[in-house]
Image (spheres, rainbow, N blue to C red):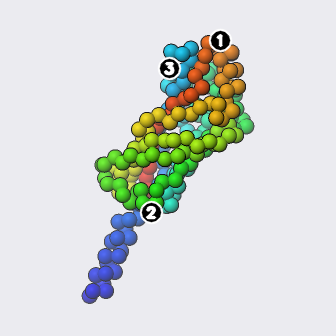
C-alpha cells in the first residue's frame, strides 16, 4: 500500500513538472516584434517584423529567428529599401537571437504573477554578433502558456552590426538630415508548451 502511494505521488509530481521541462513554441498570431526609428531628430516611426519564430527548450535555452524580409513600415518603397540597402536580406536573410534562462526559472513561476527577468541577449545580425542586455517580464498564464514581454526597449546600435553605411545610404536617398543609429526594440510573445 505504501509503495503504491509513493508511486502515485511520483507520477503526480512528474506530470505537474512536465510543462517546465517541456519544449515551448511561439504562438505567432499572439506575438509581435516592433522597433522605432527616428529621422531628422524629431520624427519617430514605429515598424514591425511580421515573420519570426521562437522556442524555449527543456534546458531553458531561448532561440529566436527573425525573417528580415518581413519588415513592415506601412510604406512598400521604404520596406524594399530596408531589405535591399539596410539589412541586405539576400546575403543576410535573418537575425538570430539567443539567451539562456536560469535552470529553475520556469519552475519558479506562479500563474498570473509576472516575474522580472534580466538577461544577456546574443544577437547575430548582418554578419556580426553582439551581446545586449534585455529586461523582460514573464507571466505563466496557465500550465501550458507563457507570456513574455519587454519591460523596457532593447537598444540595438547599428554601429555594432556594421549597419552604419546602410543608414548613410538610406539617409542620402531619402534626403534626410539624420537617421538615429540606436533603435529601440519591443515585443510581446506568447508561448505554448509542446510535450
* Quadrant of the rendered image containing residue 131: top right
Work out which residue is located at the far left of the displayed protein and give it: 1
Tell me, yes or no, whether the two marked residues, 2 and 1, touch with CB atoms within 8 Å. Answer: no
What residue is shown with label 1? Answer: 175
**Residue occupying the point 40% across, 50% down:** 146
Q: Is residue 95 above or below residue 73?
A: below
**Residue occupying the point 34% across, 50% down:** 141
* Quadrant of the rendered image containing residue 68: top right
* Image quarter hosting the N terminus: bottom left
**Residue occupying the point 33% across, 71% down:** 12
| Distance between mark 3 and mark 1 Cα atoms | 16 Å
SS class of the residue under badge 3? strand
Q: Residues within 10 Å of mark 2 (few under 14, many from 20)?
A: some
Q: Is residue 72 visible?
A: no
Earlier sequence position, callout 2 versus callout 3:
2
What residue is shown with label 2? Answer: 21
Say left or right for 107 vs 85: left
Q: Residues within 10 Å of mark 3 (few under 14, many from 20)?
A: few
Task: Give the x, y percent position of residue 37.
Answer: 54, 24
Amino acid at each position: 500500500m505504501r509503495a503504491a502511494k509513493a508511486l502515485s505521488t511520483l507520477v503526480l509530481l512528474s506530470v505537474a513538472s512536465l510543462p517546465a521541462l517541456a519544449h515551448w513554441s511561439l504562438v505567432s498570431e499572439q506575438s509581435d516584434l516592433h522597433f522605432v526609428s527616428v529621422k531628422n531628430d524629431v520624427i519617430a516611426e514605429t515598424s514591425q517584423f511580421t515573420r519570426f519564430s521562437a522556442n524555449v527548450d527543456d534546458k531553458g535555452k531561448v532561440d529566436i529567428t527573425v525573417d528580415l524580409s518581413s519588415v513592415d513600415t506601412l510604406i512598400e518603397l521604404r520596406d524594399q529599401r530596408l531589405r535591399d540597402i539596410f539589412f541586405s536580406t539576400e546575403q543576410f536573410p535573418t537575425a538570430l537571437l539567443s539567451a539562456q534562462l536560469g535552470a529553475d526559472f520556469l519552475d519558479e513561476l506562479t500563474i498570473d504573477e509576472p516575474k522580472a527577468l534580466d538577461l544577456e541577449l546574443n544577437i547575430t545580425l548582418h554578419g556580426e554578433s553582439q551581446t545586449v542586455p534585455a529586461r523582460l517580464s514573464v507571466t505563466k498564464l496557465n500550465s501550458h502558456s507563457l507570456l513574455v514581454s519587454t519591460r523596457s526597449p532593447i537598444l540595438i546600435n547599428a554601429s555594432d552590426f556594421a549597419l552604419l553605411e546602410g543608414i548613410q545610404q538610406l539617409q542620402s536617398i531619402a534626403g534626410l538630415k539624420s537617421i538615429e543609429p540606436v533603435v529601440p526594440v519591443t515585443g510581446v510573445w506568447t508561448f505554448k508548451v509542446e510535450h
